[in-house]
């Protein structure tokens, strides 16, 4: 049907793709390259000076090493919780909800309309010392004093991030679960598989890439976030995004900010690579 | 429904029914399947045949009655605990596994030793003529190959009963016929009891040594395929299994008067009745050839239509009262003697007429 492509067709394809490539190049590739160059510069008398210095990178590890580790932990835990809850939700929607499955997914997507800052403030209201959760704890007699340990830590940041990111984790998993047909599950039982064996040997292996996509989306977003930790973090809840934003905005130290960004990116890709090796199995050849 | 009962059937169903809401999809099935038989269950779609098969395999639970396999009550056992395996209509292969992994799935769950699994998997693949395909991903196989993998995956478990739920209906005609032949050969080589569900009459006859015809959740008739064809008990079976002419008439004192104007003797209760005649049981005589021999029933009419089907021809004879008789299997050498519009006589032996319940 297609036959050999004529040059005019190839030209047309190129023209159609051109706007997308242009946007990508101008808004993503070029700024990244500029930032990469800047990360080797220095700031002298509040002015950027071209240089070939690794000082900014050295400073990242000296000053922000522990924050970077903490960021990876927060991002990783957020992503794991998202994948776990996302799988449960997607599984329920696909296999337990019958014809209401798509409606459940729609509900999950609708929660995104609430916006992101609203969720942060909501969790602040729930977790603060005079908040909703403390009111319940005191009213029910589980605690005499309001707890001040609910907010401003790793837990608070992860809870809020999971709340926001869960729909993004559900979607790719649900998409792949829809490819697992009911006959496969009946066949597994018929061949002697228990419910658990069917789950682990037939269902989960067929949504590995969906699980990985869910992990990657939630991890990359969480690890790069700087709003949630600023409002709900502190101590173990601090994340490197906050400090990158500070280097760029209040300190005008672009080389430091740029170097931190690239270290964050490299660390994130490393984590994704390791997790990916676990999640994604090669197809039989 | 007395399925040619043997003393020691592999499968026994007693009063088995399945109700969904207010609808009885399967009603009060009594059935005994002989060990080692190849049974075809034939019926129109929605007749409950697949539900019946699923209840035998444990994929659907009955709402009444009991199911016994090899003397053991399995009525409420889950599929993984039954000595049955199923080949599904849309194969249900595990898309993330190779051919070998699919076939080995059940044995590895059963924790069989590695060497045994390897041997049995390669035997099963040889049986379905897919040796050499072990490492292929199943989604790169053709439809017929996929169905053969599904067959091997079930056969490798050596089930006491292999259940086949219209496994060939997605294949094209040539492939279907080839697979039917293979299935028969596999039944002979592998042994065991096969139950095959289909809505395709030709397939049911080609495969089974026993035939069960179902309609509206009930078994209409069970027996060897030839018997069911030659002596259908009901109008439904006569009509669903092959082609048939039906004649209405009245009986009094064992003498039947048919509306088409012929009489014959057949004992039974007085009243109105229906008789059936298979189209190929009748013979066609041209106007001048002397007509039917003695002892045969005959009616005269006008040839409405004659269709040359190649090896044989097919004719519709219109009688004077407006009744029509279909005659099949007219030898090709005789086709030239008949032409549409000419008068001719149809004849058949009295014994070819079978009374059918309405």
Image: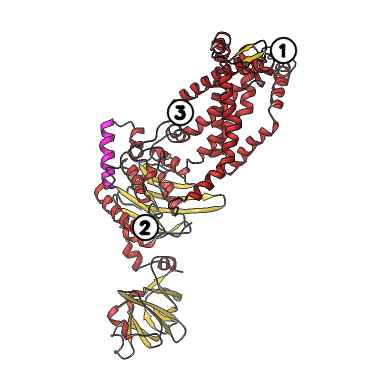
Is residue B274 one of those drawn in magenta?
A: no
Q: Which secondary structure, mark 3?
A: helix
Q: Which residues are magenta?
A: B113-130
**Residue designated by label 2:** B2
Label 1 chain ID:
A
Query: Are dots 3 and 1 in contact, CB under 8 Å?
Result: no
List the single residue furthest toward the front. Answer: A50
Tell me which numbered mark, 3 or 1, is placed earlier along the sequence: 1
Q: Work out how far the residue at label 1 is from the one at label 2, CA to CA, in angstroms.
A: 78 Å
Can residue B115 be seen in this snapshot?
yes
**Residue designated by label 1:** A146
Residue B274 is situated, as x and y percent measured from the top left of the image, at 43, 74
Q: Work out how far the residue at label 3 is from the one at label 1, CA to CA, in angstroms.
A: 42 Å
Q: Which mark is residue A279?
A: 3
Which quarter of the figure has residue B356? bottom left
List the single residue furthest toward the bottom. Answer: B288
**Up-down relation of residue B328 to residue A130 (above or below):** below
Label 3 chain ID:
A
Q: Is residue A57 left or right of residue B277?
A: right
Q: How is the image coloured?
A: secondary structure
Prevailing SS of the magenta stretch: helix
Residue toward you, B332 or B349: B332
**Up-down relation of residue A257 to residue B116 (above or below):** above
Can residue B70 be seen in this snapshot?
no
Q: Work out how far the residue at label 2 is from the one at label 3, CA to CA, in angstroms.
A: 56 Å
Residue B215 is situated, as x and y percent measured from the top left of the image, at 45, 60
């Amino acid at each position: 049907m297609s036959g050999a492509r004529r040059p005019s067709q190839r030209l047309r394809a190129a023209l159609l793709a051109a706007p997308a490539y242009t946007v990508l190049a101008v808004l993503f590739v070029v700024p990244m390259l500029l930032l990469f160059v800047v990360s080797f510069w220095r700031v002298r008398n509040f002015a950027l000076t071209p240089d070939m210095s690794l000082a900014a990178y050295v400073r990242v590890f000296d000053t922000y090493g522990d924050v970077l580790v903490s960021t990876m932990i927060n991002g990783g835990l957020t992503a794991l919780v998202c994948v776990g809850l996302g799988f449960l939700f997607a599984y329920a929607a696909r296999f337990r909800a019958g014809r209401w499955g798509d409606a459940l997914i729609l509900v999950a997507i609708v929660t995104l309309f609430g916006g992101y800052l609203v969720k942060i403030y909501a969790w602040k209201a729930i977790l603060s010392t005079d908040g909703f959760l403390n009111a319940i704890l005191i009213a029910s007699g589980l605690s005499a004093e309001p707890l001040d340990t609910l907010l401003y830590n790793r837990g608070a940041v992860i809870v809020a991030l999971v709340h926001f990111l869960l729909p993004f984790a559900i979607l790719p998993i649900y998409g792949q679960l829809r490819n697992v047909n009911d006959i496969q599950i009946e066949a597994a039982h018929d061949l002697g598989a228990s419910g658990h064996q069917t789950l682990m040997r037939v269902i989960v292996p067929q949504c590995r890439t969906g699980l990985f996509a869910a992990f990657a989306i939630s991890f990359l977003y969480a690890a790069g976030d700087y709003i949630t930790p600023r409002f709900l973090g502190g101590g173990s809840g601090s994340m490197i995004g906050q400090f990158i934003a500070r280097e760029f905005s209040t300190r005008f130290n672009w080389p430091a900010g740029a170097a931190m960004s690239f270290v964050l990116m490299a660390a994130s890709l490393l984590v994704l690579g390791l997790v990916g090796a676990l999640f994604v199995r090669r197809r039989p050849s | 429904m007395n399925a040619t009962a043997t003393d020691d059937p592999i499968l026994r169903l007693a009063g088995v029914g399945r109700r969904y809401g207010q609808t009885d999809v399967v009603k009060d099935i009594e059935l005994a399947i002989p060990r080692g038989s190849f049974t075809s269950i034939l019926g129109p779609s929605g007749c409950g045949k697949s539900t019946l098969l699923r209840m035998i395999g444990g994929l659907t639970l009955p709402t009444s009655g009991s199911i016994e396999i090899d003397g053991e009550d399995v009525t409420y056992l889950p599929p993984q605990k039954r000595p049955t395996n199923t080949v599904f209509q849309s194969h249900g292969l595990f898309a993330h596994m190779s051919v070998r992994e699919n076939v080995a799935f059940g044995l590895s769950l059963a924790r069989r030793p590695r060497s045994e699994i390897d041997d049995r998997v390669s035997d099963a693949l040889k049986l379905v003529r897919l040796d050499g395909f072990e490492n292929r991903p199943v989604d790169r196989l053709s439809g017929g190959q996929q169905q053969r993998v599904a067959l091997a995956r079930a056969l490798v478990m050596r089930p006491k009963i292999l259940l086949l739920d219209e496994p060939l209906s997605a294949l094209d005609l040539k492939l279907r016929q080839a697979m039917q032949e293979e299935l028969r050969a596999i039944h002979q080589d592998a042994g065991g009891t096969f139950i095959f569900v289909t809505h395709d009459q030709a397939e049911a006859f080609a495969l089974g040594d026993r035939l069960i015809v179902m309609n509206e959740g009930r078994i209409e008739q069970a027996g060897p395929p030839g018997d069911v064809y030659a002596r259908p008990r009901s109008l439904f079976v006569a009509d669903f299994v092959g082609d048939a002419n039906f004649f209405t008439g009245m009986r009094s004192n064992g003498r039947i008067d048919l509306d088409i104007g012929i009489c014959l003797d057949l004992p039974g209760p007085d009243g109105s009745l229906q008789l059936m005649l298979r189209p190929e049981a009748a013979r066609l005589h041209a106007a001048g050839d002397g007509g039917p021999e003695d002892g045969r029933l005959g009616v005269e009419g006008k040839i409405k239509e004659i269709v040359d089907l190649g090896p044989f021809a097919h004719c519709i004879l219109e009688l004077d009262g407006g009744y029509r008789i279909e005659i099949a299997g007219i030898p090709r050498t005789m086709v030239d003697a008949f032409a549409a519009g000419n008068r001719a006589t149809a004849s058949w032996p009295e014994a070819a007429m079978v009374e059918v319940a309405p």
